Structure formats: structure tokens, C-alpha cells
Image (cartoon, helix red, strand yellow):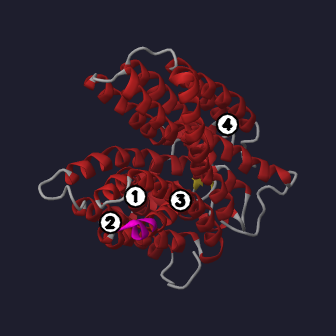
């Protein structure tokens, strides 16, 4: 009698083979991450830097516009829909739909970028972002804004986010972390530039024209940036029919997906609720706004610095550090905040490592599962993160308004800290599965 194990592979063995399979070629993941083969050696040296610049601009435009929506929403709620509680509530869904769209389309966008074209997909995404903004400027009802700004723009943002997050890593070996860090720093820079610009436009020409102006600079700058988005090798043998479903059978992949879920459920909550918490501690609303801006600047710097550090101490090691520091900031510093000084420490101590995560997430996917399928692998994680982003904030809000927690936000801070800690545990598991040598740069 023969056993089934002698004739069949285990699920994990099958998944590991599928994860390393690129069309008909089996790619060794270690060699895929090698620092000895320059993927861009046949191109002019400036090409790789142009790719970074193009991806940076698109990330700044797509995510910066989402940050700026809050300015337009506040004006509409105070001046156009004042007293209309239903309309104001509906407007509240627009930002959620835009943010949700950035991630939920990640799996589709990543796969289409690999089997079709990074550049062409980004062109479609930019056109949809332009269309969403332009149509939104003519809307008369909040539900129409949800359809245009929320869904159409969100789809466009989702189509560009995964390709632009992962394309630079395909061009570098020894400076892959720094290249990715500079690229995703565009998210923070976009918010810092576009939000004040939008506030100026709203106060001088109103919300509809601010949307129209935004639509056209997205179109012009976005299409120029799209020209530079490409990868060294585009595998034309892969099609939409041979999607790598084997990834879902791999335990390492599932652990990484859980890590992503925990992080995205936690990430945005402090940025949304810390100003309210600081005001409850006697800090003025103006000072709280400045501190949260400091946190955003710290987040942008963290994206670059952690990418730079990952090139030296290892991606997986850097990832663990950012996760545990983010957890400590929520579990220890947040509850102890009593004045402006500690609030500033909290803003910096949370913004820096949590921003660094967004640099390390695609790099960790490349380290664990190979760079040749980085866009589709990272795209799956982005789609997973959409679920966390959708659930994390409502749960935090429910905890905030629970009995006895309105004044100190203790339940919320412990909840967010616990999510970051759970993500850290997942990262440790995958780090040890990759290498049990504690002091190895991985």
C-alpha cells in the first residue's frame, strides 16, 4: 500500500513552487533578490531615476488629492449642506471610498501591470482620476459626489498605486530600499502641498472650480509622469488566465497577509483621532493641527530613512523594528500624554515608524516571494489591507464612545497598540521562517 504523501505534494510544497513560477520558468527567490545582477544594465543610467521621479509624482497626485478632500468636505458641510444632516453624512463616505479604492483594486492593478503594461495602466488610472475630479465639480447632490469623487477617482487611484509603489524596486539592487522610500514619500509630500493649495483655491474660487483645476493639473502632470513609469523586463508570456492562485496556499503568504491586515486597521486611526485627544487634554485645536502636521512630516521622512536603513540591516529586520516602535508609541506614549511636549513626541514617535512601514511592505513582499512578481504579490496585500482600512476606524470609534472612555481614549490606544503588536508577531514569524540567524541582514 502506498500513501498519498508519496504521490502528491503538500499544499505548502505546491504553493512554494507556484510562488517561484514565472510563466514556464522556475525562479529562485534568493537569486531574484540578488544584488549582483543589475536589472537595468542595458538602459541609460538616468532611466531608473526617471522611474522614481515619475512614480513619486503619481503617488503625490493620487494620495495628496485624497488628503485635500477633507478641506472641500468641510467647506461643503459648512456652507452648501449646512443643516442637512443626511447630506453631510453622505459626504463623509466620499473620503472613505477614495481611501478604500486605493487599496481594494490592488490585486487587479498589480496583475494587470505585470501581464500588460505598467505605463498604460497608469495612464488609465490618471484618466479616471481626472474624470472623477471633473465630473465631481458638476455634482449637485452628495450621492453624486460619492459616485464621481469616491468611486471613479478611487478606481483610478487604485490602478496607479500598486504599479508606482513597486516599479522602482525592479530597477535597483543595492539601493532598492532607498529607491522605494523616496517613491512612497510622495504620498506625504503630496498631502503637504496639495491640501494647502486646495484650501487656497476653495477660499478664492469655491469647491467646484477647485475640483476642475485639480482635475487638469492631475491630467497634465500625471500623463507626463506616466511616460517614465516602466520596468526593465515585461514578461509577455504571462496572461490573465495564469494567475498565481498557489500563493494563497502558502503559510508564509497568509502570515504576511495577516500582518498587512493588522497594520492597515491600525495605521490611520491615530492620525484621525489624536487631534481630538490632544484637545481633550487642554491643547488648543490650532496647536493640535500643527502637531499632526509634524506627524505627517515625520511619516514622510520615515519612509525615506527606513528604506535607506533596510539596504544595510535588511528589509525584514527593519520591518520588525518599525512595527514594534509603532506599537510602543500607542501602548505607552499615547496614554501618558498630558501636554504639548509629550504630544509632539507622540506625533514624531508614531509618524516616523508607521510611515516607514509603507516603504518596507512592498520590499518585504519582494524579499519573501520574489521581485519578478512583486506588483501582483503586493497588489494582493493591498486588497487585503482594504478590509483592514474599512474595519479599523469604525471599531476604534465604537471603543472611543464606550462607557468611561471618552475622556482618556485608553481603550482606543490599547486597541491600536495591540494591532501593531499583532503585526509585529506576524513579521517575526516570517523573519524566522526566512532565516533563524538572529543577527543576519535579511
Mark 3 falls on what kind of element?
helix
Q: Left or right of 34: which side holds 315?
A: left
Dot 4: few (<14), some (14–19), or many (≥20) neighbours within 10 Å? some
- Residue under label 3: 299
How far across and how far down the image is residue 397, in percent? 25, 48
Q: Is residue 292 magenta?
A: no
Dot 1: few (<14), some (14–19), or many (≥20) neighbours within 10 Å? many
Query: First in sequence: mark 4 or mark 1?
Result: 4
Q: Are marks 3 and 4 in contact (CB under 8 Å)?
A: no
Q: Are marks 2 and 1 in contact (CB under 8 Å)?
A: no
Mark 1 falls on what kind of element?
helix
- Disc number at residue 417? 2
Query: First in sequence: mark 3 or mark 4?
Result: 4
Query: First in sequence: mark 2 or mark 4?
Result: 4
- Residue under label 1: 263
- Disc number at residue 117? 4
From the image, give the main secondary structure of the stretch colored magenta.
Answer: helix
How far across and how far down the image is residue 181, in percent? 63, 59
Amino acid at each position: 500500500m502506498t500513501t498519498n504523501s508519496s504521490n502528491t505534494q503538500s499544499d505548502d510544497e505546491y504553493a512554494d513552487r507556484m510562488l517561484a513560477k514565472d510563466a514556464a520558468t522556475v525562479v529562485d527567490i534568493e537569486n531574484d533578490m540578488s544584488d549582483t545582477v543589475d536589472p537595468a544594465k542595458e538602459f541609460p543610467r538616468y532611466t531608473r531615476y526617471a522611474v522614481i521621479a515619475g512614480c513619486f509624482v503619481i503617488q503625490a497626485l493620487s494620495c495628496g488629492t485624497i488628503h485635500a478632500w477633507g478641506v472641500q468636505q468641510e467647506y461643503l458641510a459648512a456652507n452648501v449642506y449646512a443643516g442637512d444632516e443626511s447630506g453631510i453624512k453622505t459626504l463623509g463616505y466620499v473620503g472613505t471610498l477614495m481611501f478604500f479604492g486605493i487599496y481594494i483594486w490592488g490585486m487587479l492593478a498589480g496583475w494587470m501591470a505585470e501581464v500588460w503594461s505598467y505605463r498604460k495602466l497608469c495612464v488609465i488610472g490618471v484618466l479616471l482620476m481626472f474624470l472623477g475630479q471633473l465630473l465631481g465639480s458638476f455634482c449637485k447632490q452628495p450621492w453624486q459626489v460619492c459616485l464621481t469623487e469616491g468611486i471613479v477617482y478611487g478606481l483610478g487611484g487604485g490602478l496607479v498605486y500598486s504599479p508606482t509603489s513597486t516599479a522602482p524596486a525592479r530597477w535597483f539592487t543595492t539601493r532598492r530600499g532607498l529607491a522605494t522610500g523616496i517613491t512612497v514619500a510622495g504620498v506625504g509630500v503630496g498631502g503637504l502641498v496639495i491640501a494647502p493649495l486646495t484650501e487656497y483655491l476653495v477660499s478664492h474660487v469655491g469647491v467646484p472650480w477647485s475640483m476642475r483645476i485639480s482635475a487638469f493639473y492631475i491630467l497634465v502632470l500625471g500623463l507626463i509622469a506616466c511616460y517614465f513609469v516602466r520596468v526593465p523586463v515585461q514578461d509577455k508570456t504571462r496572461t490573465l488566465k495564469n494567475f498565481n492562485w498557489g500563493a494563497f496556499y502558502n503559510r508564509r503568504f497568509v502570515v504576511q497577509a495577516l500582518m498587512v491586515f493588522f497594520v492597515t486597521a491600525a495605521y490611520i486611526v491615530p492620525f484621525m483621532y489624536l487631534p481630538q485627544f490632544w484637545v481633550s487634554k487642554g491643547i488648543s485645536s490650532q496647536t493640535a493641527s500643527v502637531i499632526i502636521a509634524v506627524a505627517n512630516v515625520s511619516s514622510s521622512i520615515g519612509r525615506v530613512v527606513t528604506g535607506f536603513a533596510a539596504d544595510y540591516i535588511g528589509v525584514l529586520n527593519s520591518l520588525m523594528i518599525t512595527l514594534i516602535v509603532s506599537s510602543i508609541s500607542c501602548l505607552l506614549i499615547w496614554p501618558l500624554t498630558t501636554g504639548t511636549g509629550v504630544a509632539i513626541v507622540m506625533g514624531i514617535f508614531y509618524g516616523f515608524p508607521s510611515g516607514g512601514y509603507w516603504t518596507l511592505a512592498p520590499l518585504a513582499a519582494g524579499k519573501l516571494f520574489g521581485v519578478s512578481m512583486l506588483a501582483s504579490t503586493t497588489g494582493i496585500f493591498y486588497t487585503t489591507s482594504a478590509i483592514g482600512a474599512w474595519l479599523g476606524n469604525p471599531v476604534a470609534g465604537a471603543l472611543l464612545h464606550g462607557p468611561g472612555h471618552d475622556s482618556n481614549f485608553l481603550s482606543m490606544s490599547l486597541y491600536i497598540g495591540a494591532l501593531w503588536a499583532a503585526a509585529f508577531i506576524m513579521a517575526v514569524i516570517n523573519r524566522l521562517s526566512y532565516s533563524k540567524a538572529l543577527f543576519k541582514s535579511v
